[in-house]
Image: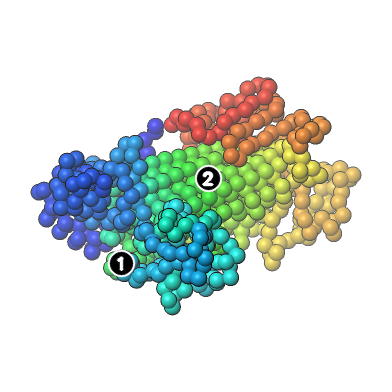
């Protein structure tokens, strides 16, 4: 595996954190062991034990309070209902390691078991209706059963209720509770909780119910700690806030696993799920100290390695991080996030801001009810590469607000609902290359300017947003429903956007029969578009014979859609002069599949099948700005090569490739 070079640590500016770190280190260093063992189920476990295999500690946080740089905390099997709050970090060559024992399931939960009884007045028989009170004494700080969940209708709470460790849905009135199973309803004046379960339980064998009592399960109180490693845990059930206006508000980015503005963390091989909002935050959270200690926001967040984690079923998003530098987010599986269906911003499988010199590599993002990958507000030196992005909502990959440079390469993005494969707005300096973009419900690639905002350059000067210096080279576009490609109308000077050396394919999806082949669209802001200028340019192209008179449209109708076939696109833009657009013969439709020219991609398996590999040409695609590997990890050599993320196409015949899981060589 290729080693990710970490930038040397930066000085922290949080004076409170430095002071507390120093006092703790001096007072405990002399007695610090090299290995601390936590074993909740051991008969002699106690938090005043030495932390050996024979006399282990009972809680992880007890070990955290003792651990010094270079120590390892080994946690044995069990369900640990606690928030682990490391008081100090490690050092560059001496990290503090938190690790689940190999082959053992170690669960950190932000919930407690809740005792319920059959609802009063019901017959003495098995019932799905249960009730009980929720004591205020269960909560150490914020009571999630009396705290409104941000960006949700009035009455929705931060609290969660779980049956067999999986979340039930909140409803806001008794009638909805009665009509819908799998729900809960809370009466705040009586502190009475009622649940309607999917099945009935007898009174002498009640259901296993839990309620969330903690915001997080692993999060320091001190901001800015560094060199901490967290491996092999299951983390679930936090009652954390939605990060609404997190950079200025009192609801910052706060995952149930949180680096708390830290640096040089390694977060690997964990399962993070069922958070009320975010699963993991690995950036600067926001200016507000969510633990109420009024610590300033430290500088130098980032330099993290976040890899091989499974992050699923979280309320709003999987991974988030603001103001982090040189982090690697790699080989994670990120499924079914935005479980609560937030429509406000800040939802994403991966959502990062000010992601400078960061890399998002080789992740699988599927079935998220939000953008798959969203890189927002400064992405200088960022790279999004070799990810498998399937069936997400809104956009597979979204780059927003910045000047770059950034590279989006060798990704597979398909089946995006209500959006694009790769989308940019207010974004410049993005190279989109060697991606496979198939069956997205809007465009394969869509780039536009939507505002008059400004972003901050590396020298701290401000620059107005634009869509400028974009490069779209060597991609494969297949059956994207609204069209393959949409770029802005070139009213702005010096935009210098260019698309070329791409492969465009239509006609492999029978449901979309009738779409014009190889569609391209100008996009625009309606208040600034110069439609008449575009109509005039196209009229001149027909009049002087550069385009055939037989293709001349009704311009009054056409100016409302601005849809261009490939030949018009080439003539008017100068783009895609070297791109290839073969016409596939549909053949007979048999059993719902096109017989000839088929290119199919599965979502669950997922497999890629191509009936005839000779459709893939070699093209003289310009070299990428960085050394590159294809989806499989093979080096991409100079010279003529295949468009898209695969460089091992056979000369002819059919192919069937299993895309995940796959051994990746770096």
Q: How many marks?
A: 2
Residue 243 is marked as none
Residue drawn at point x = 47 percent, y = 57 percent: 202
User: Above or below — where is 74 with respect to 457?
Assistant: above
Q: Secondary structure at mark 1?
A: loop
* Residue drawn 19% across the image and 60% down it: 20
Q: Is residue 586 visible?
A: no
Q: Quadrant of the N terminus?
A: top left
Name the residue rendered at 77%, 34% in the picture: 591
* Towards the viewer: 572 or 165: 165
Res. 140 mark: 1
**Residue farthest to the bottom?**
189
Q: Is residue 290 above or below residue 477?
A: below
Which residue is denoted by mark 2 in the rendering?
365
Q: Secondary structure at mark 2?
A: strand
Residue 422: percent from left, percent from top = 60, 48
**Residue 100 x, y percent position in the rendering:** 31, 42
Q: Residue 492 in the image: x percent, y percent? A: 64, 58
Q: Residue furthest left?
A: 30
């Amino acid at each position: 595996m290729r080693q990710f070079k970490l930038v040397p640590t930066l000085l922290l500016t949080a004076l409170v954190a430095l002071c507390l770190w120093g006092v703790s280190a001096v007072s405990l260093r002399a007695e610090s062991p090299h290995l601390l063992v936590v074993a909740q189920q051991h008969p002699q476990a106690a938090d005043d034990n030495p932390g050996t295999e024979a006399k282990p500690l009972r809680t992880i946080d007890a070990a955290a309070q003792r651990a010094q740089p270079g120590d390892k905390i080994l946690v044995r099997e069990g369900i640990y209902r606690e928030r682990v709050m490391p008081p100090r970090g490690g050092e560059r060559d001496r990290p503090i390691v938190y690790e689940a024992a190999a082959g053992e399931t170690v669960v950190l939960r932000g919930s407690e078991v809740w005792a319920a009884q059959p609802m009063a007045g019901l017959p003495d028989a098995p019932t799905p209706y249960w009730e009980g009170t929720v004591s205020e004494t269960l909560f150490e700080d914020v009571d999630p059963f009396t705290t409104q969940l941000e960006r949700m209708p009035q009455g929705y709470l931060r609290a969660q209720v779980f049956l067999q460790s999986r979340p039930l849905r909140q409803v806001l009135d008794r009638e909805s509770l009665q009509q819908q199973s799998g729900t809960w309803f809370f009466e705040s004046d009586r502190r009475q909780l009622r649940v309607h379960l999917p099945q009935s339980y007898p009174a002498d064998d009640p259901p296993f119910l839990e309620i969330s009592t903690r915001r997080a399960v692993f999060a320091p109180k001190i901001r800015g700690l560094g060199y901490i490693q967290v491996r092999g845990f299951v983390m679930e059930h936090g009652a954390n806030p939605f990060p609404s206006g997190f950079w200025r508000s009192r609801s910052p980015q706060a995952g149930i696993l949180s680096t708390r503005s830290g640096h040089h963390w390694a977060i690997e091989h964990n399962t993070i799920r069922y958070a009320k909002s975010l699963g993991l935050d690995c950036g600067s959270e926001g200016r507000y100290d969510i633990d109420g200690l009024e610590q300033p926001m430290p500088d130098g967040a980032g330099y993290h390695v976040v890899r091989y984690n499974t992050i699923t079923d979280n309320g709003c998003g999987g991974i988030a991080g603001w103001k982090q530098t040189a982090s690697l987010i790699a080989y994670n599986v990120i499924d079914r996030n935005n479980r609560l269906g937030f429509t406000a911003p800040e939802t994403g499988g991966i959502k990062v801001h000010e992601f400078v010199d960061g890399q998002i590599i080789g992740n699988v993002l599927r079935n998220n009810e939000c953008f798959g990958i969203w890189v927002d507000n400064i992405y200088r030196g960022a790279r999004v590469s070799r990810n498998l992005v399937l069936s997400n909502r809104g956009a597979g990959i979204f780059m927003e607000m910045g000047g770059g440079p950034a590279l989006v390469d060798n990704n597979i993005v398909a089946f995006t609902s209500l959006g694009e494969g790769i989308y940019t707005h207010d974004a410049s300096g993005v190279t989109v290359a060697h991606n496979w973009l198939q069956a997205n419900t809007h465009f394969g690639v869509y780039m536009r300017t939507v505002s008059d905002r400004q972003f901050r350059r590396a020298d701290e000067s401000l620059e107005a947003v634009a869509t400028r210096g974009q490069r779209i080279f060597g991609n494969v576009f297949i059956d994207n429903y609204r069209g393959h490609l949409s770029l802005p109308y070139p009213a702005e000077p010096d935009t210098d956007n260019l698309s070329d050396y791409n492969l465009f394919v239509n006609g492999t999806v029978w449901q979309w029969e009738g779409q014009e082949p190889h569609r391209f669209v100008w996009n625009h802001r309606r208040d600034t578009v110069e439609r008449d200028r575009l109509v005039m340019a196209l009229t001149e192209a027909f009049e002087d014979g550069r385009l055939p008179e037989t293709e001349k449209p009704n311009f009054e109708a056409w100016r409302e859609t601005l849809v261009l076939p490939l030949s018009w696109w080439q003539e008017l833009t100068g783009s895609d002069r070297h791109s290839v657009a073969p016409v596939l013969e549909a053949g007979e439709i048999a059993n719902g599949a096109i017989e000839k020219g088929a290119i199919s991609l599965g979502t669950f398996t997922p497999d890629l099948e191509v009936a005839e590999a000779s459709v893939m040409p070699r093209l003289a695609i310009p070299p990428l700005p960085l050394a590159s590997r294809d989806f499989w990890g093979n080096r991409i050599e100079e010279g003529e090569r295949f468009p898209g993320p695969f460089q091992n196409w056979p000369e002819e015949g059919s192919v069937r490739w299993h895309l995940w899981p796959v051994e990746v060589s770096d």
